[in-house]
Image (cartoon, rainbow, N blue to C red):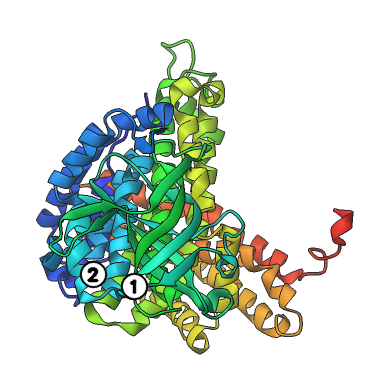
Amino acid sequence: MPSYTPPTKDMQFILHDVLNVTGSDIPGYDELEADFTSAILEEAGKLTSEVLAPLNVVGDKEGCRLENGVVYTPTGFKDAFEQVKEGGWPGLDMPEEFGGQNMPYVMGTAVGEMFSSANMAFTMYQGLTHGAASAILAHGSQQQKETYLPKMVSCEWTGTMNLTEPHCGTDLGLMRTKAAPQDDGTYRITGQKIFISAGEHDMAENIIHLVLAKIEGGPEGIKGVSLFIVPKICVNDDGSLGARNGVSVGSIEEKMGIHGNSTCVMNYDDAVGYLVGEEHKGMRAMFTMMNEARLGVGMQGLSQAEVAYQNALEYAKDRLQGRDVTGAKAPEKPADPLIVHPDIRRSLMEQKSFAEGARAFILWGATMIDAAHRAGDKDADGLVSLLTPIIKGFLTDVGYDNTIKAQQVYGGHGYIEEWGMSQYTRDARIAMIYEGANGVQALDLVGRKLAQDGGKHVMAFFDLVKSFIKDNSGQDEAFDKEFLEPLKVASKDLQAAGMYFMQNGMTNPNNALSGSYDFMHMFGHVCLGLMWAKMGKASREALANGTSDTDFHETKLATGRYYMARQLPATALHLTRIQSGADTVMALEAANF
């Protein structure tokens, strides 16, 4: 059975050596001393490795079952969920006012990675609840907050988001779910939603559905969409549970992966709903949840790549196959371990350098969310908005690819279910699709985010990279050559792609849209290149200051050199593709495909 070791040491390095959280002026960061964050991460790590990880295979094999309108989760899930609730983990970064611990989002993000690596399907129950609670916190009335948030923060009640319908996914303007106004100020919700993660289960006494619907007589298309709270069981004025609402499960989807999560078809039959925010402004409210979810999904790409890598590494060290071409490394054994072979090393280095770079990228993004929410930093909010489609799209694409690389290390055993590696690949695959398919993320990046606020945020990113290179040049010749020069070249490629879009996208928008996916990946590589340059700087300084952990920092530098030399140059290929324009992409008539 696969195992999982929480990367707490690497998280501590990123939080304190790279991001210098205690040196930040973001409210609450002064409390994030190394001993404090270590205690939180170690405790979360213990729970994830000892309780959640062993249930990952159980959830995959058993799945969820629907009996008489009730969904039963896999063996052990309910008990594990009680332990998660008892530890207060669902409310780690939620407001104290509603029962949370009010820690910064960056801590919730670090803990969330461990939960997701250990058991992605299980973690979705609390993750979706967090997102639904965040939407109510941002857009709900005070009464709604007081009614729902305390129970949701504790996960006594869980939450969902209901967007997709059988005939519409990304194009939500096509939705048919209706909301009929009532004299008492409530609405009656009627329609069907599909792909609803955690839509029904046996681990909470109530489920609070956030449902997009159109109020009768409202504007056509996306402008007529509103958001509603539709509880599974209606809540009385005193907070007690009342009558069962008109919400039911039609079926559980049969999926490729994440079998332990109950992905449901939800039927709303004259169900009581409560408007969240303003009429016809539902997308604004839902995007609070969706943007958080997209960052969480990017983290899922990292989390599955990380745990798959850990197991592939152990297999490569143990499995004997062939001899090292430069001479036997284990002459006393019939063959050398797989890890001696250069192509296995290449694969493992790709996985390792991605996982560590992606972790730094996500935690950096989390600090921007903290800056925006805790300090009202509009520039940070704009920058993380720009980077969100990259975090979601790039990290899930590459994370999935790396689960395949990890599976490949096992050879034929990777294709056998007994070894458990296929689950990581199957589970990771959904992350490229839900919360906005990655092609949509690329279109969002190029079509909306680049021009947002007059291009202010993408220019801020370029200035940030340029300033880092300038501030750190000339101090160490090797660092300049191995880290700063590759970053400079990649950043120039990214700027050249942006310039191409400006010069050619106006006359023919397809020139920009045909290159959007390459641009998203190019931008992702530059972001990871920046993170590796920052980590390289931190490790170089630690070694110069006489650190007691020489191996860790020398390994970090070697891993960073690999990324800068072997992965970051991919920006040149992406630029060439982008600059080829739309002609070859759009050449065929639909009938000729």
Amino acid at dot 1? Val
Residue 111 in picture, x, y percent from top left: 25, 51
Residue 535 in picture, x, y percent from top left: 34, 60
Image height of 251 relative to 356, above or below: above
Residue 73 seen anywhere in this rendered image of the structure: yes
Amino acid at dot 2? Gln
Residue 449 seen anywhere in this rendered image of the structure: no
Residue at 56%, 35% (x, y): give it: 343
Front in this rendered view, residue 333 or 293: 293
Image height of 426 relative to 430, above or below: above
Single out the residue that lies furthest toward the front.
Answer: 183
Do the residues bearing badges 2 and 1 touch, measured as CB atoms within 8 Å? Answer: yes
The quadrant where residue 365 appears: bottom left
With 497 as the anchor, is 433 left or right in this view? left
Residue at 60%, 71% (x, y): give it: 493
With 503 as the anchor, is 106 left or right in this view? left
Residue 78 in picture, x, y percent from top left: 24, 35
Quadrant location, the N terminus: top left
Give the residue number, with chain letter if any, for mark 2. 144
Badge 2: residue crowd in 10 Å (few <14, some 14–19, many ≥20): some
